[in-house]
Amino acid sequence: LAYKPHELINRQLTINKVRKQILTHPHLTTIGITGSYGKTGTKNFLFDILNNFLPSLKTPESYNTVFGIAKTINLELTDNLHYFISEMGAYKIGEINELCRMTPPNYAILTAIGTQHLERFKNLKNTTEAKFELINHTPPSHALVNLDNPYIAANLSKYNRLKTYSLADPKADFFVSKLLITPIGINFTLNNHAFETPLFGTSNLSNLAAALSMAMMLKIPLQLIKESVAKMNPAPHRLELKKIGQATLIDNAYSSNEKGFKNIMADLKRLKGKKALITPGIVELGGETACIHRELGKLAATVFDTIILEGHNIRTDNFAIGVRHCERSLAKGGRSMAIHTNISFLNSSSSLWPTIDRLAETHSWILLENDLPDNY
């Protein structure tokens, strides 16, 4: 982004003012969170835990830019607060460096690096460099990263003493095991401590594992952590479960990313019942848009009985191509039970909820994956 001189001056004045407020606070611990996805969910879960222990502050919704974070600090930072969780977003290299200068992190979480916002970053090398800026501003032993993410794991040799969390690798500092996902929540252990939560799905669990790991690093009492986890609910439209007719609606309309979409499909594949998907696809994938949506379509064909795609565009058309490709491949392979998914296109947003009500009469599960702003 190009800023005019007066905008640059205002930006630097804002950064300097907030930095002074943070550094002169009597007892504030700042935790920075960034990632291509998962940062808002992780922030919300961590806040629930910390705020149950001592008064805490988080950036609201997706206020993850210079002026969004500054607004939060100016309006809500008081001397009685002990923890500040700062979600840090970026669309180009250098932006997180700027946010770290404004709110110097005592601790940090890097949730994931992926194809989200690839249209702006151009390639994953740039995305990786941008997200690791937060880690570069944090003492290594206070930085927590997702070992399950291949782009993060590939860069760990450059760092010493970073803390890691994982749902797959027992070598991580914080390892999730004995995992059981059910329609009413998740049971699991983290470093041999048992937890129960009403949250749903692997993506929520990954974000929760990051929050729990950081809470342990901050030495929050274990019993308080367990009590907080047992009462947690997802933010609206982020893997939120709603009962409609005989169906369970998984409302994940807030946003979507490639990894999260694959995770929820894998979760649903393990559950019984007839399943439906409604989606407009994923935006900001740049030159990878067609390829990724074809791959998602192939996976969806093995999970859903009904797929409803919102509008005709490069995303939905390639998603449909992927579904049909999967069906043809299975038929050629001689599968006795060939997949046949009912695909249709929804051309008006006003038809969305009547469509959901209709699906709820015959399906057990309905996934609403992503919603789009008007400019898409």
Image: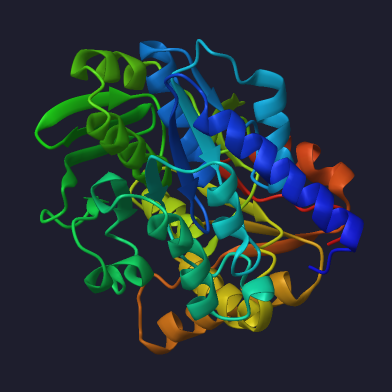
Q: In the image, is residue 313 above or below residue 210?
A: below
Instruction: Name the residue rendered at 75%, 77% in the picture.
Output: 314
Q: Please identify the quadrant where the N terminus is shown.
A: bottom right
Query: In the image, residue 152 lies at what x, y percent?
Result: 35, 66
Left or right of 333: which side holds 73? right
Query: In the image, residue 324 lies at what x, y percent?
Result: 58, 78
Query: In the image, residue 239 lies at what x, y percent?
Result: 52, 38
Query: In the image, residue 180 lies at what x, y percent?
Result: 23, 37
- Observer-nearest residue: 168 or 271? 168
Total marks drawn?
0
Instruction: Name the residue rendered at 21%, 40% in the picture.
Output: 179
Q: Quadrant of residue 284?
A: bottom right
Instruction: Name the residue rendered at 61%, 20% in the picture.
Output: 77
Residue 252 appears in the figure = yes
- Observer-nearest residue: 50 or 102? 102
Left or right of 27: which side holds 320? right
Q: In the image, is residue 376 above or below residue 235?
A: below
